[in-house]
Image (tube, helix red, strand yellow):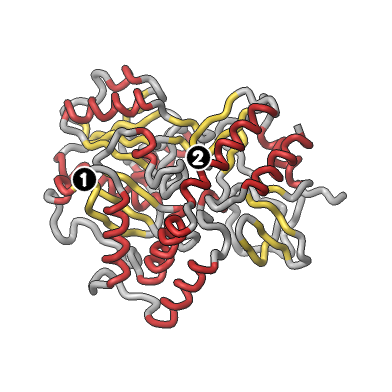
Amino acid sequence: MADLTAHPPIRPSALLATYAQFPIHPVRGEGSWLYEADGTKWLDIYGGHAVSSTGHCHPHVVEAIQDQVAELIFYSMAVPLPQRERLADELARRCPGDLSKVFFCNSGAEANENALHVARKATGRSKIVSVTGGWHGRTLGAVSVTDGAKYQAPAIRAGVPLSTKVAFNVPAAFDGVVDENVAAVIIEPIQGLSGAKDCTPEFLAAARSACDHAGAVLIYDEVQCGVGRTGKFTAAESYGVIPDIITLAKGLASGLPIGATIITSALATKLEPGDLGSTFGGGPVPCAAALATLEVLDREDVLANVTAVSARLVAGAHALGARKVWGRGLLLGLDFGRPAAEVQQALWVHRILVGTSGDPDVVRLLPPLTISAAEAELLLTGLKAVL
């Protein structure tokens, strides 16, 4: 059998090298499957970094994109667009508490940048507190609150102050750190890059209490764990601890670029026209795709599917000898006590894609939220064969 760990490009590319490449050249996608030109199909349990929320090329999403492209491809925020208004209303309706005002941009990093900007503008403070193991994006503001020397290096070179880090899942870590100088605490309720490591409710409650006491803003980065991935529309609902800002992106438009910074009405009163802006944010095509994505979540009872398939995957992973299963819903990290890269590459032989993580022993699962029970069993069968 061919060595799938070494799959050279067809020709030299002008692209800068960024990510290590999976050994697949997809030309088509359908549901949880990717297809190569010769018809070889792969089970996609990675979802393009948790982006393919409704599966690849869901017919309803495709139709919504096609219809919108035929009518109006783009106009900026300089004019009102019904798609943008509808999507903002839908997101506000689905978010808990008073998370009711929405700003659209193009990515998770941008959504986080704007969340930090809102917090600093609203409080008049500059200091940010974040969590060890956290990942928030590659723009300067985002890397300044991300953990890890190699990620923080660009912020240091640019002279951007780094956040103060508190220990992951240690509720007492906020004591004496979140004070009157802190604008915000930013947390991933489930740390994606670190291996789907989920915060405890007690940790999030301690962050909420510390922010309330100091008058700071609590931000949840739900770029990876939001939009239904935990079995609730927001991870905040899964934990019962509500922040002042939630950021969403990745799966929100089933593959088209969009980000959203959702804030409370109280924070919105601190902003003025011109404080936020994005040329491409909230364009009609990604908004149409996002609206169709939300409709699929509702019509196909996708959140119930997330809960059911997650339970089967967790039970199956434990039955296969997992030392630890991190995460919630369909953002899971499986620790089998062996290098995740070895497990990942062994699964390539079975034409199954999974992710690795910052923890070298944790295999990360981020499949489409529409993955079927039968497809989940295929993954478990593949894992049994390679372990």
Helix, strand or loop at label 2? It is loop
Disc number for residue 244: none
Amino acid type, residue under disc 2 in the picture:
Gly
**Is 239 or 176 nearer to us in this picture?**
239
Residue 63 point in image, percent of width and height: 49, 73
Q: Which residue is drawn at 72% across and 60% down?
A: 9
Helix, strand or loop at label 1? It is loop
Left or right: where 372 falls relative to 284: right
Q: Where does label 2 land, which residue?
A: 329
Q: In this view, does 81 lie above or below 296?
A: below
Label 2 to label 1: alpha-carbon separation: 24 Å
Which of the marked residues, 2 or 1, is nearer the chain's N terminus?
A: 1
Q: Where does label 1 land, which residue?
A: 98
Q: In this view, does 294 lie above or below 80?
A: above
Left or right: where 252 falls relative to 325: left
**Is 284 or 17 nearer to us in this picture?**
284
Q: Which residue is drawn at 23% across and 26% down?
A: 209
Quarter residue 135 falls in: top left
Amino acid type, residue under disc 1 in the picture:
Asp
Q: Which residue is drawn at 37% across and 50% down?
A: 248
- Residue 46 visible to an observer of this rendering: yes
